[in-house]
Structures are given as C-alpha cells and as structure tokens.
Image (tube, rainbow, N blue to C red):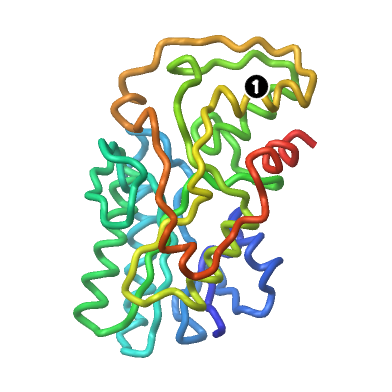
Amino acid sequence: MKLSIYGATGFIGRNFNILYPYHTIIKREEREPKSKDILFLISNVENHKLDFNASKHINTNLYILCEVLNYCKKEDIVFNFVSSSLVYGKLDDLPAIESSRCNPKGFYSITKKCAEDLIISFSETFKLKYRIIRLCNVLGRGDGNISKERNTLTWMVNNLKGNKDIELYDKGEQVRDIIHVKDACKAIELICRAGEKNQIYNVSSGKAITIKNFINIAKNKLNSISKIKYIETPKSYSEFQNKYFWMDTKKLRSLGFRENYSHEDIINELCN
C-alpha cells in the first residue's frame, strides 16, 4: 500500500509522515492522486465555533474534497477520509458507535458530516471504495494551531505553565475522549492497510477522562500556582457539545490496535 496524502503539513499529517515516510505527499496546490490509495487529512482547524465564517469551512472541508474526488472515478481507488467525532453531535446513548445517528452542530461539524455523505454517495455512483475515520481529541507535542477554541486542553496546559488562571465550564465535570497523536497515526495507518472497505471507524482510546482531572494532574506535575475558576457554561457551548462524550472502539481493536500512550503519558508530554 502506498498512500497519496493530502494535508500532510497539519499536526496529524506531519506526525504521520515521520512515522510512515514512504508514502507520497500531495502538494497543497495539487489535486490528482499519485496512487490508488488516498489518505485525505485536509480540514479547517477552527472546529469549536458555531458562528464562524461558513464559507471558509465549505471551501476547506468540501470544495477541495470535491476537486480531489473528480480524479477518483475509478473502481480501484480507495479513499480514506479522516473525519471528526464532532459529527456525532449530542448523543443520549454513549459511547458513540459508528452506527449512532449523527446530529452535528456548528459549521465545522456539519461540513465534516456532509463530506462523509458526499464520499459515500460518490462511491456508490462511481464504484470506488472508501473508509471514514472519526478522530477524537488528538493531543501531543508540536501542534502549532493551539487556541482556546481548538485543542483546548493543550491550550490550558500552556496557561498552567505560565501560571495563568484557568476557567472551566460545568465545574470541569465534562468527560472527553483523548488519544496521543502517534497512536492516532498508528490507528489511521492500520485502518488504511487492514480496515474493511466501505466502513466507518472510530479512533480514540475509548477511555473517558474529566477535564477537571486532566487539568489537576497537569497542574500538580507543573507545580503551577494557577487558580482554577468555575464559570457558567455559555448557551452556545452547551448546545454545541455533549457534557459527556466518548467513543466505542471495538471495530478498531478488532484490527489489533492497542494504544501506546496512556492519559498520564499524554499529560506528561504536554507538561514537558
């Protein structure tokens, strides 16, 4: 298997290429794949704003995808698309399984789900194969796009390093599913190599952690004097995300996947 990788300059793409350097990187301005197996990582990074510029999400998450798909009208093409756990939206039944009904909120989440549906429909029309890979929160050193809205946990750890106060919604009791970037890359490679075609795969540790516990562990490791303040949850945030969320990973583990990094390993790396 030799992958044509779109989006190789992002956080996950860079790490993937370090681990698996023998694949082909497609330049930013190019659209035509160089092999029959594609790994599509292109995505807008502003993923936690309900009121963000919709056209930017559409251009990055959909328009470029459609341009690439135009080169893929062949039965022997396998399109591996990296999506997001945010497509699930708010669920009553947890953990989220691949067959859970999605109800995404916000332009990013909606366009990622739309991208999934476009790929599935395109595949049915032109007889190519696909895999959809839904990632949870991916953490690790070297992410250059940290902000309060994106990879919030890493942003908070950076604030702890600077002894800046931390504000938490819901008393920090939100539950999240996290995975180290190298484990995420390993899971993606495994799915592209051995995953069943025309299937959706969750990629996560499958192990929930509260934001409060995550931050308290990091604060103690750093001996930070930051104060943790509990503030009222904005309505837009509560409507956008579940307070509790984690994913089922049975399908991924059936391929033989086992993560190498625990929650504490992730926190240790971010603190160093």
Q: Residue at x 54, y 43 (%)?
A: 178
Q: Is residue 105 visible?
A: no
Q: Where is residue 194 in the image (x, y as percent from the top left)?
A: 48, 77
How many numbered badges does the structure rendering display? 1
Q: How crowded is mark 1: few (under 14 residues within 10 Å), some or many (20 or more)?
A: some
Q: Which residue is drawn at 45% across and 50% down?
A: 44
Q: Where is residue 22 in the image (x, y as percent from the top left)?
A: 67, 80
Q: Which residue is drawn at 26% across and 69% down?
A: 120
What kind of residue is marked 1?
Asn
Q: Is residue 214 visible?
A: yes
Q: Is residue 63 above or below residue 163?
A: below
Q: Position of residue 207 (x, y in %)?
A: 51, 43
Nearest to the observer: residue 258 or residue 159:
258
Describe residue 192's horizontal placement relative to residue 64 as left or right.
right
| Residue to which mark 1 is pinned | 216
Residue 151: which quarter of the image? top right
Q: In this view, does 33 lie above or below 219?
A: below
Q: In this view, does 11 lie above or below 94?
A: below
Residue 133: which quarter of the image? bottom left
Quarter containing the N terminus: bottom right
Q: Where is residue 234 in the image (x, y as percent from the top left)?
A: 36, 17
Quarter containing the C terminus: top right
Q: Which residue is drawn at 52% across and 37% down?
A: 150
Nearest to the observer: residue 266 or residue 168:
266
Nearest to the observer: residue 2 or residue 182:
182
Could you say whether the residue bearing mark 1 is in a helix, strand or loop? helix
